Image: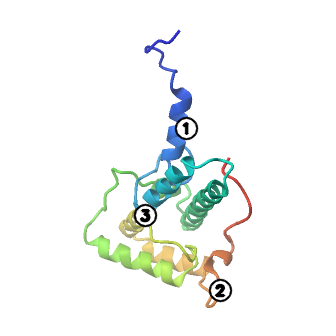
Amino acid sequence: LCSNNNPYASFGATLARDEEQNLWSTPHDVTHTEADDDRVLYNMIVVRNQLDKDSEEWQKLNYDIYTLRQTRKEVRSRWKHILEDLGFQKEADSLLSVTKLSIISDSQNMSKARDILLKLLEETNIFPTSWELSERYLFVVDRLIALDAADEFFKMASAMYPKRPGGDRAAEGPRALQSGPAAVP
């Protein structure tokens, strides 16, 4: 009955492990790459999994994990929406796809990509207030520079997600981040 030759023996465990290891947004995200913000989320998951599911600490961590994943999905959605409006309907997903094999197309673009990314953070509402820049979007901006579309992307991001002084950036713009009591499914 217990055979080591059964390829399906650990199927459920593998799926659960995949879901926990995929820290970017959704289970089986093919664009996943590990970055600092992924390690923070991973550590939250590890701590949560060591707690009793009925505890208040577990519920708080579970909510924080869910909220962080939802925030990441919303940011990605904003980027995708702008890319599609720029005419990259078919290419939007591949432009946003960052893996461990992704490289910067031209090392001279690194500085310009970093500057544009910082400008997006400071002058637009494309990222929520508490957002720490993700290395993922440095690769995306690099690709936009190579396509000569980075400046147009910034202009469109500024128009669609303008930064309003004195307000919470996460609650502004046409696609405000949704928050509310919810649990990780």
Q: Quadrant of residue 102?
A: bottom left
Q: Does 126 appear above or below 143? A: below
Give residue 16's mark. 1
The extreme right residue here reads 181
**Where is residue 182 shown, x and y percent of the image?**
72, 57
Q: Does 121 appear above or below 179? A: below
Q: Amino acid at mark 1?
A: Ala
Label 1 element class: helix
Q: Residue at x 55, y 47 (%)?
A: 49
Residue nearest the observer in this picture, 143 or 58: 58
Q: Quadrant of residue 137?
A: bottom left
Q: CA distance from mark 2 to mark 3?
A: 27 Å
Dot 3 surroundings within 10 Å: few (below 14), some, or many (20 or more)?
Answer: many
Q: CA distance from mark 1 to mark 2?
A: 39 Å
Q: Residue at x 39, y 51 (%)?
A: 99
Q: Quadrant of residue 147?
A: bottom left
Q: Amino acid at mark 3?
A: Val
**Where is residue 81 shown, x and y percent of the image?**
60, 64
Q: Amino acid at mark 2?
A: Gly
In the picture of the structure, the residue carrying the numbered disc 3 is: 140
Dot 2 surroundings within 10 Å: few (below 14), some, or many (20 or more)?
Answer: few
Q: Specify which label sits upstream in the sequence, 3 or 1.
A: 1
* CB-based contact (under 8 Å), mark 3 and mark 1: no
Quick check: can you spot residue 29?
no
Q: Residue at x 55, y 38 (%)?
A: 16
Colour treatment of the image:
rainbow
Residue nearest the observer in this picture, 109 or 164: 164
* CB-based contact (under 8 Å), mark 2 and mark 3: no
In the picture of the structure, the residue carrying the numbered disc 2 is: 167
